[in-house]
Image: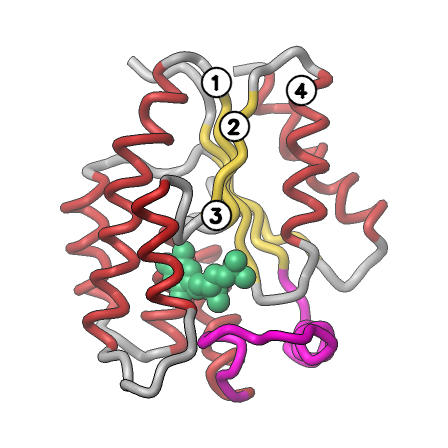
Amino acid sequence: MESGQFITLEGGEGLGKSTNLHFIKSFLENQGLSVVVTREPGGTPLAEQIRSLLLEERAEAVADKTELLLMFSARAQHLKEVIHPALAQGQWVISDRFTDATYAYQGGGRQMEVSLIQQLETWVQGLFRPDLTFLLDAPISVSMQRVKERLNNDRFEQEQLPFFERVREAYLVQARNHPDRIQVINANQSLELVQQDMVAHLLPLLQK
Ligand code: TMP
């Protein structure tokens, strides 16, 4: 029986996921909880190797099915080695991205069949889903500007505007389909307000 809570952070590139991840970690630790911070794709040595395969620029085009299966391969490893054991020990787990990102990037961005993603999700996770997901949302112009300021863009960050528009829309569709789990946070407001919104959604989880 798992007793910790599983929180995921989602959203486009450059919307402050890392900053907010650390904010949530400190907030929960201040409540006396033991917190594991992790990320996808990645989170274990093997899954981090899969991450490198996925994000590195390469001459060979990566087939959509290859990309999708690698995402779920990394996830299977991450669940077995990190997420499930930590939750079972009563730790809280915060992951920088999880399966909603697959719906957004492979489903929306790459326009792959959603039913395929649903089948893999069920196969790899069974009924396991995050307890709470924050979706940091802002107009694409905001995230694109911040990504452009970075020096080394990965394979995904090099995609063009319509790809990111589809990613954003698919994330919002996920949020509409799972309103109890996914909280959409306006990332185009001050950090202080973003974090106030997050705390408002974390407090009920603490009472569980
Ligand atoms: P990030 O560390 O900037 O979040 O980079 C991870 C990249 O991987 C990001 O561009 C989104 C992408 N991604 C997918 O395409 N599908 C997934 O399932 C996950 C977890 C990430």
Q: Nearer the viewer, residue 149 or 102?
A: 149
State the residue position of label 3.
179
Magenta part of the chain: 137-160
Tag shown at residue 91: 1
Q: Amino acid at mark 2?
A: Val
Check the image and report above or below for 159 versus 43: below
- Three-letter amino acid code at disc 4? Glu
Tell whether label 2 touches label 4 (CB within 8 Å). Answer: no
Q: Where does the image place residue 36, in percent across and percent down from the top left?
A: 52, 28
Left or right of 208 on screen, residue 184? right
- Mark 3 CB near ligand 1 (8 Å cut): no
Q: Say whether residue 180 is left or right of residue 99.
A: right
| Label 2 vs 1, first from the N-terminus | 2
Q: Nearer the viewer, mark 4 or mark 3?
A: 4
**Figure quadrant, ligand 1:** bottom left
For the residues bearing labels 3 and 2, Cβ distance under 8 angstroms: no
Label disc, if present, on residue 36 of the rendered structure:
2
Residue 170, numbered circle: none
Q: Earlier in the sequence, mark 4 or mark 3?
A: 4
Q: Residue at x 50, y 23 (%)?
A: 92
Pointer 4: what residue? 29
Q: Quadrant of residue 27?
A: top right
Disc 3 residue type (three-letter): Pro
SS of the residue at dot 4? helix
